[in-house]
Image (spheres, coloured by chain):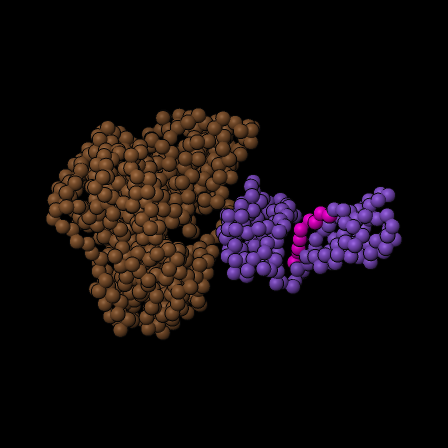
Amino acid sequence: MEKHTIIITVANRIGVLARIAGLLSSRGFNIDSIIGAPTENPDIYKIHLVVGGTEQRIEQVTKQLNKLIDTVKIVDISHKKNYIVREFILIKVKAQKNRSEILELINVFKAKVVDMTRTHITIDISGPTLKIERFIDLLRPYGIKEFVRSGKIAVSED
Amino acid sequence: MTGAEILIDALKKEGVDIMFGYPGGVVIPIFDVLYRDKEINLILTRHEQGAAHAADGYARASGKVGVCLVTSGPGATNTITGIATAKLDSIPIVVISGQVRTNIIGTDAFQETDMAGLTRSICKHNYLVQKTQELPQIIKEAFYIARSGRPGPVSLDLPLDVVTAKLKNYSYPKKVNLPGYNPTIKGNPRQIKKLAQAIKDAKKPLIMSGGGIISSGTSDELLKLLEMTNIPIVITLMGLGSIPTDHRLFLGMPGMHGRVAANYALTECDLLIAIGTRFDDRVTGDLKTFGKNAKIAHIDIDPAEIGKNVETDIPVVGDIQNVLNDLLGMIKPRIPNEWNRTTAGWKEKYKLGYKQQKTGEILPQYVVDRISHLAEQNAIIVTDVGQHQMWAALYCNHKKPRSFLSSGGLGTMGFGLPAAMGASMAYPDRMIINISGDGSIQMNIQELATCAINEIPVKIAVLNNTYLGMVRQWQELFWDRNYSKTCLKQTLHCPHDCKGPGKDCSQVYRPDFVKVAEANGIIGLRAAKPSEVDSVIKEGFRTKGPVLMEFMVRRVESVYPMVPGGKPINEMIIG
């Protein structure tokens, strides 16, 4: 079951996020991530959605989402190359003994230290999903206390 | 003007002259405007569900948007089944519900329910109006959305302060501003050309049309297409009446209780042209074998229906009217061939039938048949849901569109009587017949009083087998005759594990429908023998005003043909 990243441009009206989320759950989809935020145009709101499903099911639900009166545009960017995709993450890792190693990793990945205590470092990193996942993976042996992901956002290349 | 005055004025501008509804606390300001108004006639139903179905029946019969007005909380939730019914059959209604004041929304206030949240998945669109100044634009949009594209229900939730506040400069907007809503009207010419070519190439073409023909008003175009191409046609429950039942190319209704010829044709055709139909599971049966030899073309205004259940070779998204007209311009006459003879042969060989004896039990099919025969030419038949519905679909002589109204998608028992009231309000001069069952009629039987008080002349035929017949039929065929809770006269003294009617069965059943009718001020008639059927129907039809005719029919009659759930549609139990 492939993950699809879908960008939905909607009218900025009350309850629009609930309409999107409600439609997905009523059609039996589990949402991996969903972000809704205003855009440069105050009347327009953009929703970035990641869901899993077969090509056919995704196509069907995309059509259903498109049918919502508030939906202006919908693009499944999973197979599109001309999109810049980013994810943002905050990660708290144990750092007492291996502090310098972790700082080296942070350096290599161009991440940022946002907080440091005697026992932990909190890191802020953004980038394509693959980079993020690799970073998490490399930090795992040191002991990840907590992380939060923003979910994917994307913008088309000019 | 107050929000309530704006609402009523806007409704008139949308052409509303009849509404159905029920008052309550937060909608008193709106009812107060209606009290002074002389143009809009609001029919007070006895239950909000009745109001929603009546608006639906009005819309189905007339093609106009049906409107109902109810209060917040329980008033609003009582319309839910009505909204879902309209959604699944793509019927344009606007359901206006009151709401508590905006400043107490979310506090579990008295008679507060989150109507916008509740209706989200069962309506085409919904609104919770926040400010009086938004009201004109939203009403405009609500009606536009309900009736355009693929029609459907729209819910409009109006908080008390929105309807009481005053607005100085009110003018009703002329246009909507919905950047996200642009139904595709014109079909893609390339696809239509492909379809024209496919018709030319096909040896065994078949048309399957549905409710889309009714909602797009394209019976004439469909008939033209049939005359030109001689392609046999099957019509789903929602499309019955699109063409006359006795049309030479009509093979019948397909699906679970479809005609044998229709289901055989669907299985054998090499080109299936689906028009305004959505491949419901009750029509397709097992999807793996459905249309297995066919190239499938699908004409629909809703792109989301294309490929939803059945993979489509030639998708045509657009308004049927445009698509059929374009198609008619591209095709040449087709001469009937071997396939026409084969399908006509099936139709001849597998006729519908029943054997009504002169004495003994009344067969329900016979009652339906006689009603159809004795009804006026332009009568509208409205059904409930269950066995009687299928018999009405199979045995009535459907002549015209919008003359057979039935809850197809949701299968709502209790739909019939209020929907018949709605149809009657749309066409006060036409004969409106509600064919119902003893189970269904009880689900909105309170509306008998509405009919009596408002002199709504619905002719109600109750096929009484004192069973929930369709479920009983399934229990008989697939559940070892375990008639669990389907006998409506099972008493405390009956055996728990009853296997069907026997000598010990109680003669008593409840309620006595004739008495119920009379208690409501409606004439009640009963036929208990075959010889009484015609005279009861004739007397019922002759009598002015609403009438309830009860027919004591054979208790264990089943609807055939029948395709067991999930089986290929050519594997029918013929009965």
* Residue ID at (65%, 62%): A82
Camera-side residue: B81 or B324?
A: B81
Camera-side residue: B499 or B114?
A: B499
| Residue A44 rendering spot, x and y as whole percentages | 60, 47
Image quadrant occupied by the C terminus of chain A: bottom right
Q: In the rendered view, would you say B270 is above or below B56?
A: below
* Residue ID at (73%, 50%): A89
User: In the rendered structure, does residue B168 fall within the stretch colored magenta?
Assistant: no
Q: In the rendered view, would you say B492 is above or below B93?
A: above
| Residue B32 rendering spot, x and y as whole percentages | 40, 25
- Residue B338, can we see it? yes
Q: Which chain is purple?
A: A
Res B498 → quadrant: top left
- Residue B534, can we see it? no
Magenta-drawn segment: A147-156
* Residue ID at (87%, 50%): A97
Main secondary-structure element of the magenta-colored stretch: strand
Res B67 → quadrant: top left
Image quadrant occupied by the N terminus of chain A: bottom right
| Residue B188 rendering spot, x and y as whole percentages | 44, 63
Q: Is residue B135 left or right of residue B469?
A: right
Camera-side residue: B166 or B308?
A: B308
Q: How many marks?
A: 0
Q: Which chain is brown?
A: B
Q: In the rendered view, would you say B289 is above or below B85?
A: below
Q: Is residue B572 left or right of residue B539?
A: right
Q: Is residue B168 left or right of residue B280?
A: right
| Residue A90 rendering spot, x and y as whole percentages | 75, 48
* Residue ID at (51%, 46%): B177
